């Protein structure tokens, strides 16, 4: 859960410049700017550039978001088009923008 003072820490695994990867980056950035302005850190990991890291962390699908600030860390697969999934994973009320 992200409270009013917490920083959202996200690691997004993508597959190069694939359309789903581009959408996931854009959707996560827009989500964070709306719901966590100035309170988020996004790390983008391209599995083509860092295949060993992806395998070590068990990343088998992309795009895949790891919410590192959640305890335990949560994973969401997909292009993050449905912001309600992210809101639910972070424990943020839908009207809290």
Image: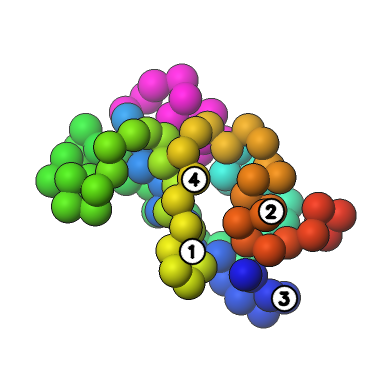
Say what secondary structure mark 3 lies in. Answer: loop
Q: Residue 64 appears at what percent x and percent y? A: 41, 41
Q: Which residues are magenta?
A: 16-26
Extreme-bottom residue of the structure? 5
Q: Residue 95 appears at what percent x and percent y? A: 86, 54
Extreme-right residue of the structure? 95
Give me the C-alpha separation between circle 4 and circle 1: 14 Å
Along the polypeptide, which appears first: circle 2 or circle 4? 4
Q: Is residue 18 above or below residue 52?
A: above
Q: State which quadrant residue 59 falls in.
A: top left
Colouring convention used in this rendered image of the protein: rainbow
Along the polypeptide, which appears first: circle 1 or circle 2? 1
Give me the C-alpha separation between circle 3 and circle 1: 14 Å
Say what secondary structure mark 4 lies in. Answer: strand
Residue highlighted by disc 4: 76
Front: mark 4 or 1: 4
Q: Is residue 37 visible?
A: no
Residue highlighted by disc 2: 87
Q: State which quadrant residue 36 falls in.
A: bottom right
Q: Residue 84 appears at what percent x and percent y? A: 71, 45
In the image, what residue occupies the spot 79% across and 59% down?
Answer: 93
- Mark number displayed over residue 17: none
Residue highlighted by disc 1: 9
Residue highlighted by disc 3: 4
Q: Predominant secondary structure in magenta?
A: helix
């Amino acid at each position: 859960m992200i409270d009013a003072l917490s920083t959202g820490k996200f690691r997004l695994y993508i597959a190069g410049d694939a359309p789903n990867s581009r959408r996931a980056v854009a959707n996560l950035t827009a989500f964070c700017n709306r719901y966590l302005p100035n309170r988020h850190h996004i790390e983008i990991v391209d599995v083509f550039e860092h295949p060993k890291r992806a395998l070590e962390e068990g990343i088998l699908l992309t795009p895949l978001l790891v919410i590192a600030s959640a305890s335990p860390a949560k994973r969401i697969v997909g292009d993050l088009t449905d912001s309600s999934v992210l809101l639910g994973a972070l424990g943020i009320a839908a009207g809290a923008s």
